[in-house]
Amino acid sequence: MEKLLIEATKSSPFIRFDHAEHTLEIRGESYPENAAKAYAPMFAWLEEYLQGLQDDVVRVDLEITYFNSSSSKILMNFFDMLEDAAQAGKKIVVNWHYHEDNETALECGEEFMEDMELVEFNLREISDEES
């Protein structure tokens, strides 16, 4: 299985999924015109990866500074896939990174965290000094 690397565009985030390191990273803004089409490669990769996952811990790092409603649906589907994998016995840790002055990102992270029962979901504040 190859790494998935999708460079950021004006309206879509940087995505790097590494099966060997068991790390999934999504960073940037997300408001593509057709979110389902834009994220289709990510979902295809993730489905294959999760099927082959054994006992490894998967770390998911998200730092999404802005997303529209269609991207919100994509994120919900993404988290549903992770939760399903956790129900199947996979160990998954999500780190939702947000800038200290971005209350909206914090609130969104809190809402996503409420839906997670088996996935470990951490809110990670980024101070302006770290940026």
Image (spheres, helix red, strand yellow):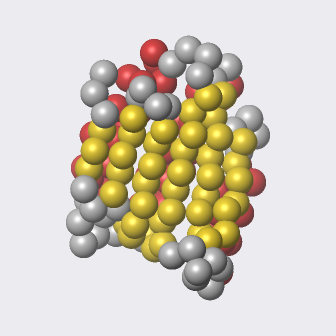
Q: Quadrant of residue 43?
A: top left
- 112 vs 30: above or below: above
Picture residue at 34% right of the left edge, 61% below the top: 13
Q: Quadrant of residue 11?
A: bottom left
The outermost residue toward the front is 129
Q: Can you give x and y, in whole percent of width and height, for residue 76 in the image?
A: 54, 51
Q: Can you give x and y, in whole percent of width and height, for residue 46 in the image?
A: 41, 32
Q: Can you give x and y, in whole percent of width and height, for residue 92 in the image?
A: 63, 34
- 36 vs 53: above or below: below
Q: 6 or 36: nearer the eye?
A: 6
Picture residue at 58% right of the left edge, 80% below the top: 129
- Residue 40 seen in the figure: no
- 95 vs 47: above or below: below
Q: 33 or 65: nearer the eye?
A: 65
- 85 vs 23: above or below: above
- Residue 78 seen in the figure: yes
Picture residue at 54% right of the left edge, 44% below the top: 60
Picture residue at 39% right of the left edge, 69% below the top: 29
